[in-house]
Image (spheres, rainbow, N blue to C red):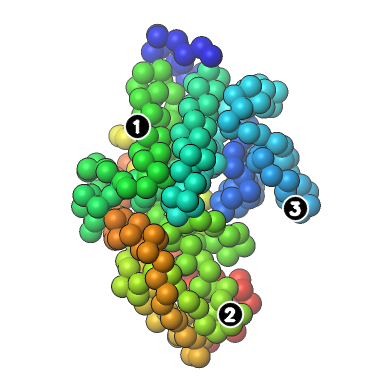
C-alpha cells in the first residue's frame, strides 16, 4: 500500500463535472439498494455498482451491475476500483449497534479494519469517499437535547466507537493526504421496502409492518424513548447533496443531519389516527434500552443547513402516511 507522506500528492484530479463511477459496499443492507436506484437515475444504470459478500435476489441483479466485494480483502477491493474505473465510493458495510454488542470481534473487524482498507484504497485512487456515521457516535456524556456537531463523543458501543474512529480517520486522511472524505451522521433511518438488521432504532421500521399485518406491535424500547429519525428518501437525498456539494462550501467533513424526533408513544399516537384498533405493548430489551438512553434525543444539524442547504421533507405525519401507503393499508 502506498500512502505518501506528501500531503499534496492526492490533490484532486476529479472535477465535479465528470460523471462519477460509483461503488457501494455493503450494498444489501438497509440503504444500499435504495441508494443505487437513486444514484442510477442521476448517473446512469451502468455507472453505479452495488456490491456485497452475499448473493442478491434476482430483481437486484436485474436492476444494474452487482459484484462480489469483500472489504476485508484489500486486493479484491483494489481490483474492483481499478477494473471499474471507480471515482466515488459509498461505504455502507457495518454491523449496527445492537448486533455489534453481540459480536464485538466481528464488528471490530468489519467496522474498523474494513474501514482502513476502504480509506487506503480511496486515498490511493483519488476517490471521493462517503462513510455514514450515526447518532450512535455519541454517548452518555454528550449533550443529548440537542446534540451539536462538535461536542464530547464517548460512545459505549463498539458500533459507536468504530464510527467515531471512522469520522476521525476520514478527517485525518483529508487533512494529511487530501482525501475527499465526506460523512453524515444519520439518525435512525425508516424505510419501507428494506429492513434494517441489528439496530436500536429498528422498532420504528418494524412497527409499520406489524401494525398493518396484525394491528398490534410489541416494542423493545420504553414508550418515552426519544430518538432522532429520518425517512429514507430524505437520507438518500442528503447523501447525494453532500457528495455533490462544492468542496469550498464544506466547513467540516462530518455533519449531523436531522429530520424529526419522536418516542414510540408519539409514533403509536400517529398510527392510531390511521388504524384506530392499533395496540402497542412494551417488552423492553435491556441492551437496546441502555444504548438508546445514551444517544441524542434531538440532533442539531444547523451546520448542514447553513453550509450546503440541507432541508428535510418528511416529518412524522408524512412519514406515517407514506409508510402506511407502502404497506397497503387503508389510510383514513
Ligand atoms: C442503529 O440503531 O444501530 C442504527 C443507527 C441509529 O445508527 N440504525
SS label for mark 2: helix
- Residue that numbered label 3 is attached to: 57
Q: Residue at x 48, y 62 (%)?
A: 202
The total of numbered circles placed on residues is 3
Q: Nearer the viewer, residue 278 or 330?
A: 278
Question: Are the residues at dot 1 and dot 3 in contact (C-beta closer than 8 Å)?
Answer: no
Q: Position of residue 42 (x, y in %)?
A: 61, 44
Q: Position of residue 198 (x, y in %)?
A: 51, 56
- Decide if residue 161 is in sight here: yes
- Residue that numbered label 2 is attached to: 212
Q: Position of residue 294 (x, y in %)?
A: 29, 56
Question: Are the residues at dot 2 and dot 1 in contact (C-beta closer than 8 Å)?
Answer: no
Q: CA distance from mark 3 to mark 2?
A: 25 Å
SS label for mark 1: helix
Q: Residue at x 61, y 80 (%)?
A: 213
10 Å crowding of disc 1: few (<14), some (14-19), many (20+): some
- In screen coordinates, is 246 left or right of 328? left
Q: Residue at x 44, y 64 (%)?
A: 314
Q: Which of marks 2 and 3 precedes in the sequence? A: 3
- Please say if 322 is above or below 331: above
Disc 1 CB within 8 Å of nearest ligand 1 atom: no
- Residue that numbered label 1 is attached to: 168
10 Å crowding of disc 3: few (<14), some (14-19), many (20+): few
Q: Which of marks 1 and 2 precedes in the sequence? A: 1
- Please say if 282 is above or below 162: below
- Please say if 30 is above or below 212: above
Q: Residue at x 55, y 20 (%)?
A: 125
Q: Nearer the viewer, residue 166 or 24?
A: 166
10 Å crowding of disc 2: few (<14), some (14-19), many (20+): some
Q: CA distance from mark 2 to mark 1?
A: 42 Å
- In screen coordinates, is 54 left or right of 141? right
Q: Position of residue 3 (x, y in %)?
A: 47, 13
Amino acid at each position: 500500500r502506498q500512502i505518501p507522506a506528501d500531503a499534496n500528492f492526492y490533490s484532486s484530479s476529479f472535477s465535479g463535472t465528470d460523471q462519477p463511477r460509483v461503488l457501494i459496499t455493503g450494498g444489501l443492507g438497509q440503504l444500499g439498494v435504495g441508494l443505487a436506484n437513486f444514484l442510477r437515475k442521476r448517473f446512469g444504470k451502468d455507472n453505479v455498482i452495488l456490491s456485497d459478500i452475499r448473493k442478491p435476489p434476482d430483481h437486484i441483479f436485474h436492476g444494474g451491475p452487482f459484484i462480489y466485494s469483500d472489504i476485508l480483502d484489500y486486493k479484491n477491493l483494489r481490483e474492483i476500483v481499478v477494473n471499474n474505473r471507480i471515482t466515488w465510493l459509498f461505504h455502507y458495510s457495518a454491523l449496527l449497534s445492537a448486533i455489534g454488542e453481540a459480536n464485538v470481534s466481528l464488528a471490530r473487524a468489519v467496522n474498523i479494519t474494513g474501514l482502513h482498507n476502504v480509506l487506503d484504497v480511496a486515498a490511493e485512487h483519488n476517490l471521493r469517499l462517503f462513510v455514514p456515521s450515526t447518532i450512535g457516535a455519541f454517548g452518555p456524556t454528550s449533550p443529548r437535547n440537542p446534540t451539536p456537531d462538535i461536542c464530547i463523543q464517548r460512545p459505549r458501543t463498539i458500533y459507536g466507537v468504530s464510527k467515531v474512529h471512522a469520522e476521525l480517520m476520514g478527517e485525518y486522511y483529508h487533512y494529511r493526504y487530501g482525501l475527499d472524505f465526506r460523512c453524515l451522521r444519520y439518525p435512525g433511518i425508516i424505510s419501507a421496502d428494506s429492513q434494517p438488521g441489528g439496530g436500536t432504532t429498528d422498532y420504528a421500521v418494524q412497527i409499520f409492518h406489524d401494525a398493518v399485518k396484525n394491528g398490534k406491535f410489541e416494542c423493545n424500547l420504553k414508550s418515552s424513548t426519544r430518538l432522532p429519525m429520518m425517512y429514507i428518501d430524505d437520507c438518500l437525498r442528503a447523501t447525494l447533496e453532500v457528495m455533490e456539494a462544492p468542496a469550498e462550501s464544506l466547513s467540516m467533513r462530518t455533519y449531523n443531519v436531522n429530520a424529526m424526533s419522536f418516542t414510540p408513544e408519539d409514533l403509536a399516537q400517529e398510527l392510531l389516527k390511521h388504524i384506530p384498533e392499533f395496540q402497542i405493548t412494551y417488552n423492553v430489551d435491556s441492551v437496546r434500552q441502555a444504548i438508546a438512553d445514551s444517544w441524542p434525543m434531538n440532533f442539531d444539524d444547523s451546520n448542514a443547513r447553513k453550509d450546503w442547504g440541507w432541508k428535510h421533507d418528511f416529518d412524522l405525519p408524512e412519514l406515517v402516511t407514506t409508510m402506511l401507503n407502502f404497506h397497503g393499508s387503508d389510510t383514513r
